[in-house]
Image (cartoon, coloured by chain):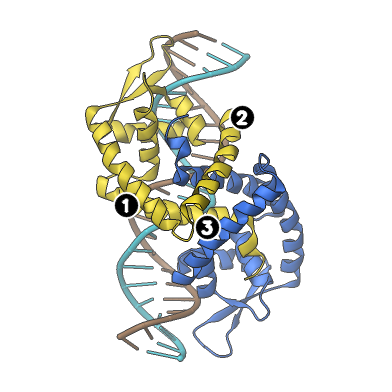
Chain colours: A blue, B yellow, C brown, D cyan
Amino acid sequence: MGELTEDLGFLLARVSGDVVRATNAALAEEGLRVRQYAVLLLACDSRRGVSQRAMARILGLDPSQVVALVDELAQAGLVERQPAPTDRRAKLVTTTEAGHRKRERAAVRAADAVRGALGPLSAAEQATLRELLSRVARVASHSE
Amino acid sequence: MGELTEDLGFLLARVSGDVVRATNAALAEEGLRVRQYAVLLLACDSRRGVSQRAMARILGLDPSQVVALVDELAQAGLVERQPAPTDRRAKLVTTTEAGHRKRERAAVRAADAVRGALGPLSAAEQATLRELLSRVARVASHSE
DNA sequence: TATTGTTATACTCTATAACTATA
DNA sequence: TATAGTTATAGAGTATAACAATA
């Protein structure tokens, strides 16, 4: 074990890659990839829909990438674009009935995959990890 | 804040993405990307050189991806492929003088970038993060 | 002038399959 | 028969720039 394996940047990328791989494999049975699943979740958990710009900020993606993801989900009948009442430039993404059902099934598979990939850590340690990362992510979502 | 922002898989991918982005930007001044930097580090920290297969296992990459990375570093004069004495199939990757100097400069920039990207966490919290992730990564490196 | 959504383009990363030479 | 390195290819992810409609 050399210095690389103690590098925090490397470790994040390494573990994240494994977790994304495992999650993608699990979600494939529902016809979804992690990115699409994340967009679906954001739409599901919002009352009146989310603008694509807001999604991009939360996801850490370029707005143009969100367009493609919403396109795919819309084509699959899982989400819909609706005109925003207050701002005619914006479109709010909302979830269809099928989208909500899909999300339920996908959430179970995704959670299992993540838990499996992080097997070496106890539930308490996974909670610690979640707390630390969410602090970093929260700052990033605000400043972008 | 909905359920997505509490999802451990999402948080890992989100933070990892930001850190890789920041590190790539910092390493660009040395003409390197994180992947190349990781390979350079592995070669630097080995006495007699590392096989590409071993690198692939540690990095969590397909062996064919390592070929391309070593090609790029070799073309830049930073590493060299040498025949393995014990196994004529294998080639050991070693570092040149220029490679060692490049690594020194790159390491400073990379460390700064990671520390900056994880700014919301104290040094102790970053150490906790490192310890947790290294346990997961260690298991993954063995089983693949 | 700035912002939302969008299209387009190029580049990097990821996933597979196949081939060669050795073991 | 299995392993190390390699080549090739297609698909997913990332990074920019530009544009129309609207604020």
Question: In this rendering, does residue B38 appear at all?
Answer: yes
Q: Position of residue B11 (x, y in %)?
A: 57, 57
- Image point 40% across, 38% down: which residue? B38
Instruction: Find numbered disc 2 in the image and state the secondary structure of the residue it sits on.
Output: helix
Say which amino acid is labelled 3. Answer: Arg
- Image point 55% across, 39% down: which residue? B134
Where residue B26 is drawn, which disc sits there?
A: 1
Tell me the distance, in whole angstroms, between the alpha carbons under discs 2 and 1: 32 Å
Mark 2 sits on what residue?
B143
Residue nearest the viewer, comparing B131 with A63 = B131
Mark 3 sits on what residue?
B14
Residues packed near mark 1 inside 10 Å, few (<14), some (14 to 19) or many (20 plus): many
Instruction: Find numbered disc 1 in the image and state the secondary structure of the residue it sits on.
Output: helix
**Which quadrant does the N terminus of chain B fall into?**
bottom right
Residue nearest the viewer, comparing A75 with B97 = B97
Residues packed near mark 2 inside 10 Å, few (<14), some (14 to 19) or many (20 plus): few
